[in-house]
Amino acid sequence: MKINELLTENQSKYQEGISVIQMLEAIVKAKSAKEVRFAEGKSKVDLYTASAVMKVFDAVNEENKRKILNMIGTRDGFMKIAKFAFAKTGAKTEMGEMTSAGSIATSMGGGNGFANGGPGTMKRADSTRKKKKKSK
């Protein structure tokens, strides 16, 4: 089912979800992170997350697309769907951990709005380092 068909079917019920999906499509097309408007505010979504959500959205049947559109209009719903998308697409990262851009952006709290330091910020992988022995 096309998004335009859902618009005519029940416009008010799915309007917020449809606008989020359209913004995610724009992110995937532009291959760049952008701000997405949710019911309670804006958040920046990276290409990796948008791509995973869109792969799942495109793969599910019409009934599940309606469920996704009903949920995705809020930040909490988007986070649940993104977590599900990561699990189903075989992604090795979880929401809130490192992504391809190096961060998951948020618009809550102080700072620069990025949970992990900002775009391009490298996060050191969890690794063990051998301590150097002091020579006497």
Image (cartoon, rainbow, N blue to C red):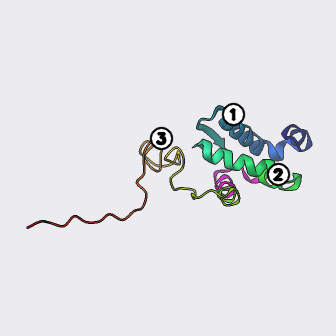
* Amino acid identity at mark 3: Pro
Q: Which residue position is annotated with label 3?
A: 119
Q: Residue furthest front?
A: 135
Q: Which of pointers 2 and 1 indicates the residue nearer the eye?
A: 1
N-term-proximal mark, 1 vs 3: 1
Disc number at residue 29?
A: 1
Q: The C terminus is located in which quarter? A: bottom left
User: Dot 3 lies on which element?
Assistant: loop
- Left or right, 131 with reference to 125: left
- Residue at 42% across, 61% down: 126
Q: Which residues are magenta?
A: 71-82
Pinpoint residue 95: horizontal percent, then vertical percent. Answer: 57, 56
Cα gap from disc 1 to disc 3, whole angstroms? 19 Å
Pinpoint residue 108: horizontal percent, then vertical percent. Answer: 51, 48
In magenta segment, residue 79: yes
Pinpoint residue 20: horizontal percent, then vertical percent. Answer: 71, 42
Cα gap from disc 2 to disc 1, whole angstroms? 20 Å
Q: Which residue position is annotated with label 2?
A: 65
- Left or right, 103 with reference to 12: left
Q: Which of pointers 3 and 2 indicates the residue nearer the eye?
A: 3
Locate residue 19: give its quadrant.
Answer: top right
